[in-house]
Amino acid sequence: MSADAVGRMRVVLAPDSFKGTLGAAEAADALAAGWRLRRPDDDLVTLPLADGGEGTLDALGHDVPGADWRETEVSGPDGRPVRAAWLLLPDGTAVVEMARAAGLPLLTEPDPLGATTRGLGELLAVVVADPAVHRVMLTVGGSATTDGGTGALAALGARFLDADGADLPPGGGALARLARVDLGGLVPPPPGGVQCLVDVTAPLLGPLGAAGQFGPQKGATPAQVAELDAALARLAEHLHGDPDAPGAGAAGGTAFGFAACWGAQFVSGADAVAAAAGLDDALAGADLVVTGEGQFDAQSLRGKVVGALVERARTARVPVTVVAGRVDADGDLPVAGTLSLTDLAGSAAAAMAEPARWLTEAGRLLATGARGH
């Protein structure tokens, strides 16, 4: 370790959110509070992270100096107005979180055939009209929709028409009647392009696609899943994108729609957020990095926050400790250690009832065992 002569350590606290209990920033603060109980003089860097879904705005708003919060009113997934925030970073990157405009929690009840991404397009229209915006980082997790992004693209000037030349109504179900697409009035993307942050590798179509894999989570019956899959196949025929691209099925096919019409590039959400948050700079000279999430298992190391952080920490030669609500992983793990809040609290229910308390205790225990030079 590179701690200084009197034992002072540099520790990076970079958790994901603990889904359903604490956001990433709150988790980082709780770990820091516990650590300071034992080692108040250490240099602690709180750097909450996200995988490109919900929580990305909060993480980057915390991590990036000079990040500017903006907000506008848009149509929610059922057409009712909602207030949707977005973030302008100092380098001209606009971070747009789809869930803020078209997320499942915005619906009073699921509407798999009718839920629309129109509000996302209304939000993006405001974003790209801002002269300070050079590129867009679009996070697509947590959507309520399976319309292939057509609602958003329609709000940006595209037209999706039936055989009579009439605009289709909102929702993925209407795409079964799609006869023609007119992109002549589509607002162009920003000059620096669009990154679509995805945390899934689903294609657009089939049992592992937008409707097949995620439709049931949005309330779709088996018959509606089949209807939506066929409707998205019809959309793919008209847009000439790549429905088999890994990630095309993200957010009910919104990733596919924006790749086909706006040239969006699919990138790992966890990697993109880590880069934008400045994780590599934070790791420089660090003695330890502590990360965390609700459940740590084999999947955590593949495309998730913990996996992205472990790779960067390995390059920087900084040991990683994982704190999780539950640890369900064994064998030869590429981390220095793990700590389970369930074990600390005595049960999963107790850990979830007071997550900040047990994360603070985890931070205290980790600091107790830490040794500076």
Image (cartoon, helix red, strand yellow):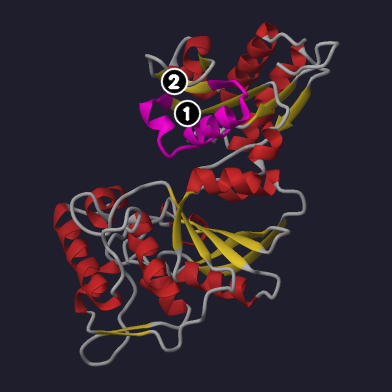
Query: Which of the 4 quarters of the picture holds residue 330?
Result: top left
Q: Which mark is residue 294?
A: 1
Residue 270 placed where, x, y %? Answer: 51, 43
Residue type at numbered disc 1: Gly
Residue 316 placed where, x, y %? Answer: 62, 30
For mark 2, what is the residue?
Answer: 326
Task: Indicate yes or no whether the magenta region holds residue 313.
Answer: yes
Q: Which residues are magenta?
A: 296-322
Question: How many numbered discs, if any?
Answer: 2
**Residue 53 visible in this rendered orientation of the protein:** no
- Is 51 displayed left or right of 128 in the figure? left
The answer to whether the residues at label 2 and label 1 have Cβ atoms under 8 Å apart is yes
Judged from the image, the secondary structure of the residue bearing numbered disc 1 is strand
Q: Which mark is residue 174?
A: none
When the figure is inspected, residue 42 is found, relative to residue 93, above or below; the finding is above
- First reached walking from the N terminus: tag 2 or tag 1: 1
Residue 363 placed where, x, y %? Answer: 65, 17
